[in-house]
């Protein structure tokens, strides 16, 4: 096991972690504002991936328009979900929203199977993004670099938005206390809708990247990113956007390093090791890595 | 409680129980194998929902670990009841003391339940310090760890292939008494000082602590009690399906049980019972629609729609945390 | 208001439960158990399509036993063991004369024993564990070859034709099918004097193989080939990532690789030097294969998704053939007729039940992929 081997494994972990982080940002945004564990978030990733496929491979649009389409599709789906399912039950216990999001997720998955069949489809990205870069002992693809940079870029963008704009201020106020925010004259419905639109748009673009990275999509693909972003967000401290990113990286690194550094027979135990580690992290820091006590209103 | 009131309370339980036995007898004679197996799954789901309601509903511990306890109970029961000859064929590497052992069904179920409860004690000690979503992720982790271990522990569990061709020991006469026992215990707990303590822990920890409630003890007890019945349900499940594999006890199953508790009304025993019946029957009822029109998946979509509608119109579940008026003396 | 709505809904659902399709004459019912939703649906859904197509063709040709129609009732068991058991009971309660289904052993083992108990034959279209007939009993029949046959076939090819000596084996450790495949493959490689230099594992649903690939790169002695025991969902993904990492060694596998994804996901440039053993169907020009592919395209508007479509088609064909020979739909007579099947010309190769194991004696195709093109290298026959 040389240094090059370990370096390659760490790079692999960071790439996978960026993918998880990218999905977790939107997840955490939505959680932050209305304390909703949105399990359907992963399925918005799936829709983003299929919209990308339709616009790129069927309609043949240029890449920039495809990306815009994936963002828009995510935002539209997010808005529809919020208006249709979550707004009517606002104010209900947290677990109600969680269960409703599961129902939405089951609906989207089975609609996908009904309309598109369960067959996985291949997904071809422009050749420029598939090129392999060799940097000393490690190698990765251009798309991996794009994913890593956009995860970081989006994090900065979202943070600026939340900290510096009027809408961001409204969001923070709503997250702090919904009723007081309403009394202060903030349009709660619009603010929450905006958070959903943005969070889901991020999921849409994550779908584009997911398809580009793995080259194969199917109607059930949302399950994994949904689950991983949930775990990443919780590890980081629910509601904290930097926390979600950190959680995503830790999860990605843990998954790759447990397989890469332990003897091969333990590869099959990967999930047990990963979740064991997560439980230990939570026991040491019961509110996640960057979470605060007040974030949780269980 | 006066003697008279105690009598009416007993009557309230004995009468429905007797009615349930009569109903079971009628169903058994009238219905075919398929519908009868649905009836049995309704019973098992009642045990699962009502027992999870002790943990999630009354004490407010958001646990996704229920199928993990089921898996433990199911495998223990299946291995204990497996005839020695089949054990030799399926599990040649079993330790000698286990290989020769064959237990009758009911003791095997009890042992399965106890193993699940013991596991709950062990994992509860560290994990129950967590709250809310953090606890949900930790219990989900527990479920996944159980699944991984069962998948890889070939010498005892036969790996991903699982144990199959189990005897079909689960009849309505096995399920019904366990359903009644689960209901009875859960009812007794809810309307005892322990139950009040649990609800106090859920509603306001600080206040409960000020009143001298041992938070941690209450939490661990509530998890273990739920786990015992989940383990028993796992054993019944295995011998109704007559096969058990690690992938049977998935996160999706955890969600389904949580859904029943929430839709019924967190904390309401009657609510969990009703939701378990409603969901099991509806899933089967949508099948002919799928089979007739070839629209596979439409059943799941309709179920999800029903679920969302219930949650919109009854965000606190069908019955809130209460029991129906005619079943309780004072406000439940 | 809500309660009324719920009540109505429940009543509606119950009413639907008792609507049955109008029967013309007395149809012969077959219960087709498949996982049409959930994780296994990409494998099982095409198989049901194939089964329904066969029934349609038989009915158009005049049906069976003097004009009786064949009705395939597709039951979705949702990738769930519990649903598999209730689905089997439902089919039996509906009075099916035979059951068929599944591309995976664990689901067959939840359903088939119930058919055995009632004395109704069960034919699996795609489950390949060679012990299935032994485990279930004399009413259990297999359309495909056993995992031992397909593993031996590709192992022989790896050593004798590719000249590989040092071999790496990747196994999906979450499924019985993939574990069995690897077991038989390793056994044969060792018999042939080859050496397993690396054994690595992953789980169904994994998308990222970067950790395993890094290890494969660093294995000494350098592997001459890598055997990947996977189902179709991971086939294209693993090939793409191995080739993108710059590894050029031959990739070998079993019928889990029999999917277009092996060429479409990596693209034609990277889909190179791949060899897999599968049912004699792909790139085959026997008349029954050509006719099947044409009929399937006409019915569903696209070519068969994978070999499971052809296997589902064969399962119904096999049962229909036995009903014709038995001249009845009685369980015992049908079982005897099935067991007496000799040289049935199925799309996936001739089927004869002559071996004591109950596994059909069928040829195994070795398919190669070069620049995204499939080619039959040879047809391997079991002894």
Image (cartoon, coloured by chain):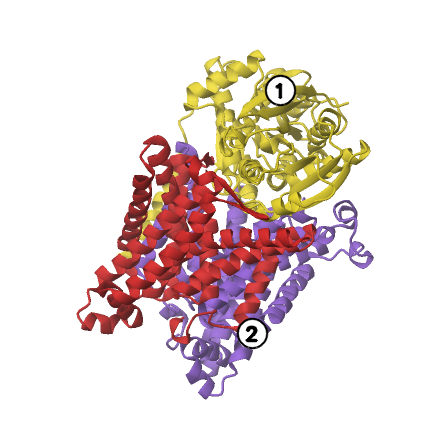
Q: Residues within 10 Å of mark 1 (few under 14, many from 20)?
A: some
The residue tagged 2 is B220
| Above or below A218: residue A278 | below
Most foreground residue, B177 or A125: A125
The hue used for chain A is red
Q: Quadrant of residue C133?
A: top right
Q: Residues within 10 Å of mark 2 (few under 14, many from 20)?
A: many
Most foreground residue, C188 or A60: A60
The hue used for chain B is purple
Q: Which chain is yellow?
A: C
Secondary structure of residue under mark 1: strand
Cα distance, mark 2 to mark 1? 62 Å
Most foreground residue, C114 or B300: B300
Secondary structure of residue under mark 2: helix
The tag on residue C198 is: none
The tag on residue C376 is: 1
- The residue that appears at 71% across and 40% down in the rendered structure is C222
């Amino acid at each position: 096991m040389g240094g090059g081997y370990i370096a390659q494994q760490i790079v692999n972990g960071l790439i996978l972690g960026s993918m998880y982080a990218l999905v977790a940002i939107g997840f955490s945004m939505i959680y932050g504002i209305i304390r909703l564990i949105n399990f359907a978030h992963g399925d918005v990733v799936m829709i983003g991936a299929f919209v990308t496929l339709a616009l790129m491979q069927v309609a043949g649009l240029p890449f920039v328009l495809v990306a815009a389409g994936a963002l828009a599709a995510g935002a539209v789906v997010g808005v529809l979900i919020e208006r249709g399912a979550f707004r009517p039950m606002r104010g209900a216990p947290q677990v109600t929203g969680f269960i409703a999001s599961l129902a939405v997720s089951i609906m989207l998955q089975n609609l996908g199977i009904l309309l598109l069949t369960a067959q996985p489809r291949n997904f071809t990205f422009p050749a420029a993004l598939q090129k392999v870069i060799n940097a000393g002992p490690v190698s990765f693809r251009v798309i991996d670099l794009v994913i890593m940079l956009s995860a970081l870029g989006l994090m900065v963008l979202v943070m600026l938005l939340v900290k510096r704009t009027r809408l961001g201020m409204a969001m923070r106020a709503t997250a702090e206390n919904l009723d007081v925010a309403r009394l202060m004259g903030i349009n709660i419905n619009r603010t929450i809708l905006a958070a959903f639109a943005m969070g889901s748009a991020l999921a849409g673009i994550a779908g584009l990247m997911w398809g580009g990275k793995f080259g194969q999509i199917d109607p059930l693909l949302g399950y994994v990113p949904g689950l991983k972003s949930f775990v990443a967000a919780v590890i980081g401290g629910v509601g904290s956007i930097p926390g979600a990113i950190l959680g995503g990286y830790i999860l990605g690194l843990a998954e790759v390093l447990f397989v890469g550094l332990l003897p091969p027979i333990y590869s099959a135990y990967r999930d047990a090791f990963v979740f064991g580690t997560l439980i230990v992290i939570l026991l040491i820091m019961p509110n996640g890595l960057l979470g605060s006590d007040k974030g949780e209103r269980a | 409680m006066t003697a008279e009131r105690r009598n009416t309370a007993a009557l309230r339980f004995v009468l429905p129980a007797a009615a349930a036995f009569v109903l079971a007898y009628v169903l058994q004679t009238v219905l075919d194998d398929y519908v009868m197996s649905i009836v049995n799954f309704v019973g098992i789901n009642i045990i699962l929902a009502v027992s999870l309601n002790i943990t999630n509903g009354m004490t407010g511990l958001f646990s996704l670990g229920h199928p993990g306890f089921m898996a433990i109970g199911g495998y223990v029961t299946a291995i204990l009841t497996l005839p020695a000859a089949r054990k030799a064929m399926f599990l040649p590497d079993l330790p000698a003391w286990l290989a020769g052992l064959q237990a009758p069904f009911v003791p095997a179920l009890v042992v399965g339940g106890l193993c699940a409860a013991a596991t709950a004690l062990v994992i509860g000690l560290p994990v129950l310090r967590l709250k809310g979503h953090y606890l949900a992720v930790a219990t989900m982790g527990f479920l996944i760890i159980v699944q991984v271990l069962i998948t890889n522990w070939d010498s005892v569990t036969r790996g991903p292939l699982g144990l199959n061709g189990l005897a079909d020991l689960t009849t309505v006469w096995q399920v019904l008494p366990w359903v009644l026992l689960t209901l009875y215990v859960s009812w007794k707990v809810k309307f005892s000082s322990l139950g009040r303590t649990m609800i106090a822990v859920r509603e306001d920890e600080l206040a409960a602590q000020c009143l001298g409630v041992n938070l941690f003890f209450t939490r661990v007890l509530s998890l273990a009690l739920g786990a015992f019945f989940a383990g028993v349900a796992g054993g019944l499940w295995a011998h109704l399906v007559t096969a058990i594999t690690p992938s049977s006890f998935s996160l999706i199953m955890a969600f389904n049980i949580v859904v029943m508790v929430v839709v019924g009304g967190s904390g309401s025993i009657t609510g969990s019972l009703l939701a378990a019946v409603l969901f099991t029957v509806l899933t089967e009822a949508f099948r002919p629609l799928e089979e007739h029109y070839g629209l596979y998946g439409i059943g799941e979509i309709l179920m999800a729609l029903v679920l969302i509608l219930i949650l919109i119109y009854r965000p606190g579940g069908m019955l809130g945390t209460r029991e129906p008026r005619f079943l309780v003396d004072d406000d439940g | 208001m809500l309660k009324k709505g719920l009540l109505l809904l429940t009543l509606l659902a119950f009413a639907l439960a008792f609507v049955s399709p109008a029967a013309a004459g007395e149809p012969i019912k077959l219960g087709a158990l498949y996982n049409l939703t959930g994780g296994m649906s990409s494998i099982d859904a095409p198989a049901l399509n194939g089964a329904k197509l066969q029934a349609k063709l038989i009915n158009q040709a005049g049906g069976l036993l003097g004009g009786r129609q064949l009705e395939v009732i597709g039951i979705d068991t949702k990738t769930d063991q519990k649903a598999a058991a209730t689905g089997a009971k439902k089919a039996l309660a509906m009075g099916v004369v035979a059951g068929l289904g599944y591309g995976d052993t664990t689901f067959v083992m939840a359903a088939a024993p119930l058919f055995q108990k009632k004395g109704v034959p069960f034919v699996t279209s795609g489950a390949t564990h060679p012990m299935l007939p032994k485990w279930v009993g004399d009413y259990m029949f297999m359309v495909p070859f056993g995992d031992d046959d397909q593993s031996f076939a590709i192992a022989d090819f790896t050593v004798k034709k590719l000249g590989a000596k040092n071999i790496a084996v990747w196994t999906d450790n979450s499924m019985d099918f993939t574990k069995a495949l690897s077991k038989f493959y390793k056994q044969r490689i060792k018999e042939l004097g080859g050496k397993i230099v690396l054994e690595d594992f992953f789980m169904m649903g994994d998308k990222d193989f970067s950790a395993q690939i890094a290890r494969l790169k660093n294995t000494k002695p350098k592997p001459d080939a890598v055997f990947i025991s996977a189902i179709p969902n991971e086939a294209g993904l693993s090939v793409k990532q191995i080739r993108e990492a710059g590894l050029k060694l031959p990739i070998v596998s079993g019928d889990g690789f029999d999917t277009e994804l092996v060429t479409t996901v990596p693209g034609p440039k990277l889909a190179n030097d791949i060899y897999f053993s599968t049912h004699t169907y792909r790139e085959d020009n026997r008349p029954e294969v050509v006719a099947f592919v044409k009929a399937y395209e006409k019915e569903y508007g696209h070519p068969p998704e994978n070999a499971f479509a052809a296997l589902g088609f064969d399962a119904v064909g096999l049962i229909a053939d036995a009903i014709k020979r038995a001249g009845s739909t009685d369980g015992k007579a049908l079982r005897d007729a099935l067991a007496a099947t000799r040289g049935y010309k199925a799309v996936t190769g001739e089927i004869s039940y002559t071996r004591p194991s109950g596994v059909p004696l069928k040829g195994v195709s070795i398919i190669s992929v070069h620049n995204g093109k499939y080619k039959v290298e040879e047809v391997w026959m079991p002894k």
